[in-house]
Amino acid sequence: MSSPIPKTQIEKTQAQLLKHHGGNGYQASLMIANSYDARHDRSFWRFWDESVACHYQVGDGVLDLGAGIGQFVRDCANRYPKSSVYGIDAATYMVNDAVKLPANAQILLDDLNLPQAPIAENSLAMVMANNMVHELTQPIKMFKATYQWLKSGGRFCIIDPIRQPLKQQLDKAYSHTQLWGDETSVEDLENVFEFFLEHNRYHADDLIYLLESAGFKVVDNSTLLNGKFIRLVVEK
Ligand SMILES: C[S@@+](CC[C@H](N)C(=O)[O-])C[C@H]1O[C@@H](n2cnc3c(N)ncnc32)[C@H](O)[C@@H]1O
């Protein structure tokens, strides 16, 4: 019997991501596309200018980690027309469906569990990781690469869901019958608990511990959406 062909690192990540996205990449890309404008309103951009872009100098690079269909990459490329603006994503259903980008922007297909994108060391002033860190199987290689790519004084913004009580997650997403009804299968329940674990990986202190261990200094720390998300800004 022939043994199965081993998957490359990025193929393993792509399979894991498709499962995380409920088996429907198109639906996942629609969800982020449709929520983008509300998440990037005027107050977001004020925060970005004041707390993340503060050490940007014309020509410095900008990077979005887990860029999805590239909306943030597009907006940064328009805001910083003299900069190279990169996005990284591992999912082909995101990258192939990307929005039209200005000439100074590009999206790179790369696995942030083991980043290999050809970005020069010390070349970036700003990096964003929005709603992505919890999707990684481990974030250490990504934090190390980001530290290398950032210039001294460059800033890294992380927005990510943080641990919530089980009740909060279940009551929001499922009816009592969906969870406790006799018709509910073990597989359905396994998916519910896997979803809970994947979106409740880190406490805010866990992320701060990892970022400080990577060499970053925390400069801003706030919660969003009634404590469901953390928004951290760290500096190299
Ligand atoms: C929830 S979406 C957020 C997209 C975008 N940052 C936003 O806020 O609209 C997370 C993105 O991270 C990407 N991602 C997750 N794990 C990744 C990995 N290991 N390498 C590269 N991209 C990854 C997913 O494909 C997806 O596009």
Image (cartoon, grey):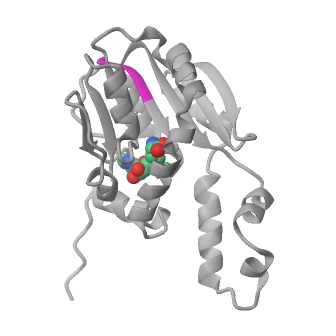
Q: How many marks?
A: 0
**Residue ID at (76%, 59%):** 166
Q: Could you say where residue 94 lies in the image, as x and y percent from the top left?
A: 34, 53
**Residue ID at (72%, 79%):** 178
Q: Quadrant of residue 50?
A: top right
**Residue 226 visible in the shown view:** yes
- Determine the main secondary structure of the stretch shown in magenta: strand
Quarter of the image where the N terminus is located: bottom left
**In this picture, which residue range is highlighted in magenta?**
122-127
Look at the picture and state if 154 lies above or below 131: above
The answer to which of 160 and 42 lies nearer the viewer is: 42
Q: Is residue 155 magenta?
A: no
Q: Could you say where residue 165 lies in the image, as x and y percent from the top left?
A: 78, 54
Q: Could you say where residue 156 lies in the image, as x and y percent from the top left?
A: 47, 25
Look at the picture and state if 33 lies above or below 57: below
Look at the picture and state if 164 lies above or below 118: below
**Residue ID at (42%, 60%):** 17
**Residue 145 visible in the shown view:** no
Q: Quadrant of residue 44?
A: top right
